[in-house]
Amino acid sequence: MVRTWGLLACWTLFRIGAAAQGEKIDEEKPVIPPLHQSIVVTATPVEPSLDRRDAEVFHRTLFSRDDQILHVLDAGISAGQHEGGGKSLEIRRFGFNLDHGGVNGGLKVLVDDIQQNQSTQGHGQGYLGSLKNLSPELVQEVQLINGPFSAEYGDFSGLGVVHIRLRESLPDQWTVRVQGGSFNTARGFLGYSPDLKNADALVAYEGSSTDGPFQNPLRYRRDNVTGNYTRHPSSQQSLGFRFMGGRNDFYSSGQIPLDEVAAGRLDRFGFIDPTGGGRVRSGTAAIYYRRDGAGGSVFKADGFLSRSLFDLYSNFTFFRDDPENGDGIQQHDSRLIEGTNAQYLRPHRLGGVQGLLTTGANYHDNQINVGLYPRIGRVPTGVTNRANARVSNGAGYAQENITLLHGRVLAGAGVRFDEFRFNVRDRLQPAQSGVEFAGLWQPKASLAFTPSQRVPLTLHANYGRGISTSDARAVVQHPGIKRVATTDFYQLGASHHSGRVSVTTDLFWIDRSNEQVYVPDDGTTEFKGPSRAYGYEAKTSVEITRHLSLHAGMTKVANAYFRGLFARSYVPNAPHFVANAALTVSSWRGWSGSLRMRAINHYRLDEQDPTIVASGHTVFDFGVARRIRRGVEFNLTLDNLTDRSYYETQNYFESALPGQLPRARIHGTPGYPLTVAVGVTFRLRGK
C-alpha cells in the first residue's frame, strides 16, 4: 500500500510539472497539486483562507541562498531572483507581477508583527530586501493568508499576507550547523539558548558566502545576528525584547539579453557590466508585551525601531543611452523606521451565539533619504534625483467572528481604516516638494457553512478589500494620480477533511483599481489599470503513513487583463499556472527528508503581442537529514536535482550592447544549476 501511494505521489509531481510546460491534462481528472514540504499543513474548515506551516522544513533543510525561504512557502507564490542572490526576489501571484513585493496589490510580509515591505524604497515600492536578515533555523511558524481577508493587515496586503513567527528559544542550549557546497558556498549557524527560570532567551549568529555559478563571481557575503529575551512574570504575562541585525554585500551579473545567449555570443552565466551588485546594513530592535485576561481575552502591544542603509548598483539597459560609459546607476536608500501595534481579542457570548471580537491599531513611520545617481564602475558621476521623504501611516480596525447552529456556521465581518501622510522635500527641484494625504476604508466579510456534521465538507466565501500605496515622490509630484490602489478580492470554495486527507478548492475573482509599473531608469512609478484576474486553486495534504506525507497545490489564472479598453490588453509579466508539491519523510528510523517541486508555465511579457513570452520551468529540490547519534545530524541538499536549464526571472525591454543599436528584447536571470550542499548539525545539551 505504501509503495502504491509513493508511486502515485511521484506521478502527481511529474504531471504537475508537465502541465507547467504546456502539456494538456484531462480537465475531468484534476491533478492533486501542492501545499508545502512541511510535515503539518492545515487549512481548517473554520478558516479555510489561512494555511499554517510548522518549522520542520526550516530546521532540516540546508539553505544555500536566503531567497530560498520563499520558495518553500508555496501558496501560489512564484518568486525569482534578479541579481543571482543578493537582491530582493521578484514576486508573482494570481497573474500579477508584484515587482519586489509592494505593487499591483502587494504581498505583505511580516516578521513578528514588523512589516518587511519598505515604502518609497530606492529600488521599488514595497521592497522586501530586509528579509535577508532572517535565519531559517529560527523560524517557528509561518502563517499564510490567501487574500486581504483580515482587518489586522493594511498596506501591501491585496494579494495576501505572509506572517513569519520566530522562536523565543531553541530546544537545545547549543545549536551548531556548518555546511559547504557548490560554487565556493560556505555557511555556519551558531545558536545559544540558556535554560532559564520564567524566561526564554537565545542569541544566534549566521554567516554565509558564495560565488554562485556566474562568470563574474557573486562574492556574496551575509552576516546576521539575532537576539531574544522574553520574561514571564506570571503565567498570564510576558515581556520580550528582540534584536535583529545584518549585512550583505554582493556583485551580480544582472539580467542579460537572451538573444545574445541564443546566438552563442554570451554564456548563460555571463555578464555585461562586472560592477553591478550592492551592499546593505540594517538593524531592528523591538519590544513585545502580552497579557492573557479573564474569559480568554488577550491584550498584545509591541513597538520597534529599525535603521537601514542600502546601495544597489544596476545596469538595466547597458549602453543604450551612453554608448561610451554605459548606463550604470546607483540606487541609494537610507531610512529610519518606527512602528507600534496594539491588539485586543475578546471572546464573548450573546444568547446562543459565540463570538470573538478583535480590535487594534497600528502606526508606521518612515524617514527616508532616497536618491538615484549615474555611475562609472561604482563611483557616482552625477545626480539624477535626490529627496528626503517621510511616509507615516496610522490605522485602526475591528473584526467580529461569530459561530451559529452549533458550530456549523462561522460568519465574520470587519473594517479597517488607514490614513497616510506623504511628505517629500526634493533636494534637486524644491518646487516638487510638498505634503499630500490619503485615507481609505477596507471592508472584510467571510462565511463558512458545514451542511452536516456527518459529512466533512465546509463551503466558504471570503471578501476583502486590500490596499497598496504609491511611491511618495510620485504622489507629491503628480497630486492628481491615484495615491492608494485598491484590490477587491472575492473567493468562493469548499474544504474537505477526512482522516488523513485534506482538500481545499476555491474560485477567485480579483479587481484592481490601478496597476503600477516601476521604471528603473528614473526611479518613478507608472500607473495603468484598472485590471481584473480570475481563476481557481486546489490544495491537498495527505498523510500517507505516520512518517510519510504529500502536500501539493496549484493556482490557475484563467485570465488577467486591463478593464475598460476597446481592444483587449493583457496584464503581462506573471505566470498563469503555479504549482508546488512536496513528498516528505519525517523521523523514520533516524531519517528525515523531502522531495520538492515548483513549476510555472510560460507567460507573456507584452500586453499586446502574445508571441513575446517568458519560458516556464519545473524544478525539483531534494533534501535529507540523518541522525548519526544523539545530538549529531548529517544534512544533504540537492537543489535543481535534474540540473534543469531555466531562468528565474525574465523581462522585456530595450537595451544595447557596444556597437549595437538599441532594440527591445527579453532579458533573464539564470536559475542555479544542480547545487550540492553538505552539512553537519550539532544539537547539544537539550532542555
Image: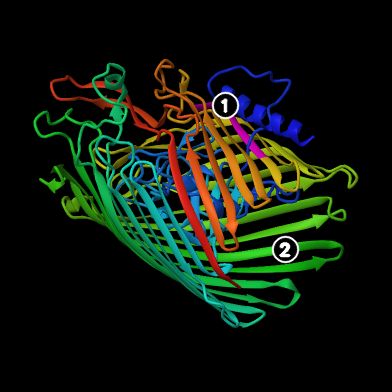
Q: Position of residue 552 (x, y in %)?
A: 64, 37
Q: Position of residue 78 (x, y in %)?
A: 50, 37
Q: Report the amino acid beneath label 2.
A: Leu
- Mark number, residue 356: 2
**Element at label 1:** helix
The magenta region covers: 551-563
Marks 1,2: beta carbons within 8 A:
no
- Mark number, residue 444: none
Taking 643 as reference, is 592 left or right?
Answer: right
Callout 1: few (<14), some (14-19), or many (20+) C-alpha neighbours within 10 Å? many
Give the quarter of the figure containing the C terminus. Answer: bottom right
Residue 519, compared with residue 38, is above or below; it is above
* Residue labelled with disc 1: 17
Q: Report the amino acid beneath label 1.
A: Gly
Residue 528, compared with residue 163, is above or below; it is above
Q: Farthest residue toward the front?
A: 629
Q: Is residue 30 magenta?
A: no
* Figure disc tally: 2
